[in-house]
Image (cartoon, helix red, strand yellow):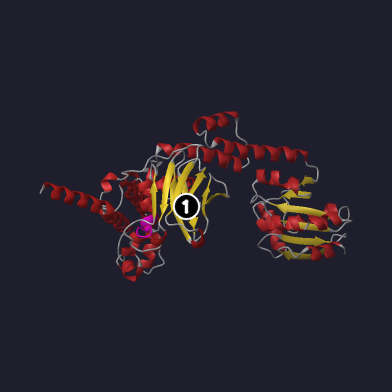
């Protein structure tokens, strides 16, 4: 009788495990953000793999820090279905994995070894009894749930009770504070359901609730638009005093889980935005402090400010893993500054800041009589402006000494950015007042850039163009 009882117990335990009901033994909470120059090592296997049945590689892509380029790692699949990849994310962050026609997102922890088992016949199968992608490692349970259940726990779904015709109608007549409390109630209701779901590990529950909190915060910000629609009115609703007071207790960014929900640099930037609403800095985990400092210094460099010796020392001390990237940006800026000092193909010019009306353009073109002139209205941030400058280079080379080229911008181009950009643009450069710039564009019936004006050798306007008209057109105008 004892043997039968024990047999039954083992069967029950096995059944519970297969159903995922032993969540209490799985990862209970997400760890703090980790930094390391050591890679995440992913050791994977495609079950029953046959080279003839599918692609022979797995591709991983991820963003490192604030680079616009994504790093890619290709992992060839061996004949036995195994593959290995080293992901150098530098900190805990999200990674996209591409295999066959499937793309999944998981979180990589540096200096960790992760296992990944892919069961092809379960990929895309709704409510499969077993996960198609099963992870091991320090946060393996979380990643398995993240891939398996993410579609089931879409953050926007918690807003359904106040969306659609009926949902919007339910808000009619509410005060702004009643609306806020209704939105917060949506979070409480959804969080209770998540906590009661025995399929999920505790770490994934934290993650889901973090995505819900963020969705709720965004929805409270939209009180005016939402209530105006609900009440069919064009009259804005006044924000009551203390409306955002809930943020000090709600604390949407206090858990490390929030910083797993999007690329880490993006999550840090997002969390920085909401202190103004709360009237105080909102809590964030201590483990995001290193990347916050690195982002601060990277932003300073992007604004064309070289780091001081003290800032460099602080960077190296407080975020050593990210310091080399920021210092590389700093060195690039230093090189640009030195190159600008050596450049001789440009000249900074000026006109009287008090000039107005048509006198502005007359003053600009006066020094250039005797040769044809191209006047280029541009800005440092204008992509089409810079692209046209590359296109026109052959014309400038051909007409060197036979025509003049001047470039006009204003304070919409940050002064430091302008100073470091113009050494590569041969010609004369003017940084006019905003009023003068607006006057000039209006004179040529333009509200956008790039705008071009061609002038003959006697100072008479030949033509003007909104957008670059092409080398042949410009060359023809400057040959008259």
From the top left corner, tell me how far across and down residue 406 is, in percent.
Answer: 78, 53
Q: Is residue 339 left or right of residue 146?
A: right
Residue at which label 1 appears: 80
Q: Is residue 73 left or right of residue 174?
A: right
Q: Which residues are magenta?
A: 147-154
Q: Residue at point 42% right, 46% down?
A: 115
Location of the C terminus (image quadrant): bottom right
| Predominant secondary structure, magenta span | loop
In this view of the protein, which residue sits in the foreground, 126 or 193? 126
From the top left corner, tell me how far across and down residue 345 is, in percent.
Answer: 80, 46
Residue 326: quadrant of the picture: top right
Count neighbours of disc 1 (C-alpha within 10 A) and say few if under 14, some if 14 to 19, many if 20 or more.
few
**Res 351 seen here:** no
Q: Is residue 202 magenta?
A: no
Compared with 42, 478 (above or below) is below
Toward the left, the furthest residue is 1
């Amino acid at each position: 009788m004892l043997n039968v009882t024990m047999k039954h117990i083992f069967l029950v335990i096995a059944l519970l495990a297969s159903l995922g009901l032993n969540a209490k033994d799985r990862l209970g909470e997400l760890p703090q953000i980790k930094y390391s120059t050591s890679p995440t090592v992913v050791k994977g296997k495609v079950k029953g793999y046959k080279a003839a049945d599918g692609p022979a590689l797995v591709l991983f892509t991820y963003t490192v820090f604030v680079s616009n380029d994504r790093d890619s790692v290709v992992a060839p699949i061996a004949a036995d279905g195994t593959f290995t990849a080293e992901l150098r994310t530098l900190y805990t962050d999200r990674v996209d994995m591409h295999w066959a026609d499937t793309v999944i997102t998981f979180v990589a922890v540096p200096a960790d070894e992760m296992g990944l088992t892919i069961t092809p016949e379960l990929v895309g199968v709704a409510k499969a009894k077993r996960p198609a992608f099963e992870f091991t490692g320090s946060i393996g349970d979380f990643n398995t749930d993240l891939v398996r259940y993410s579609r089931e726990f879409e953050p926007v779904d918690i807003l359904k009770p106040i969306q659609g015709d009926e949902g919007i109608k339910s808000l009619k007549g509410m005060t702004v504070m009643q609306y806020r409390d209704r939105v917060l109630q949506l979070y409480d209701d959804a969080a209770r359901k998540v906590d009661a779901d025995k399929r999920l590990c505790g770490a994934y529950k934290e993650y889901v609730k973090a995505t819900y909190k963020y969705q709720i915060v965004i929805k409270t910000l939209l009180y005016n638009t939402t209530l105006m629609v609900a009440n069919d009115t064009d009259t804005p609703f006044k924000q009551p005093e203390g409306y955002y007071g809930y943020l000090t207790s709600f604390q949407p960014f206090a858990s490390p889980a929030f910083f797993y929900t999007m690329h880490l640099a993006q999550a840090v930037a997002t969390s920085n935005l909401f202190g103004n609403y709360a009237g105080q800095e909102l809590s964030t985990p201590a483990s995001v402090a290193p990347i916050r400092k690195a982002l601060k210094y990277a932003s300073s460099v992007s604004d064309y400010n070289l780091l001081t010796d003290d800032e460099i020392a602080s960077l190296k001390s407080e975020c050593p893993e990210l310091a080399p990237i920021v210092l590389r940006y700093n060195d690039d800026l230093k090189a640009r500054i030195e190159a600008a000092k050596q450049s001789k193909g440009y000249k900074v010019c000026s006109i009287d800041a008090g000039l107005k009306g048509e006198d502005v353009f007359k003053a600009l073109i006066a020094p250039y009589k005797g040769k044809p002139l191209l006047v280029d209205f541009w800005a440092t941030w204008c992509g089409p402006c810079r692209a046209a400058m590359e296109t026109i280079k052959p014309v400038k080379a051909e007409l060197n000494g036979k025509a003049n080229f001047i470039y006009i911008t204003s304070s919409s181009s940050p002064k430091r950015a302008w100073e470091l950009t113009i050494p590569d643009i041969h010609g004369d450069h003017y940084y006019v007042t905003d009023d003068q710039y607006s006057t000039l564009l209006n004179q040529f019936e333009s509200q956008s850039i790039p705008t071009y004006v061609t002038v003959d050798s006697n100072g008479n306007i030949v033509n003007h163009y909104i957008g670059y008209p092409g080398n042949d057109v410009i060359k023809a105008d400057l040959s008259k």
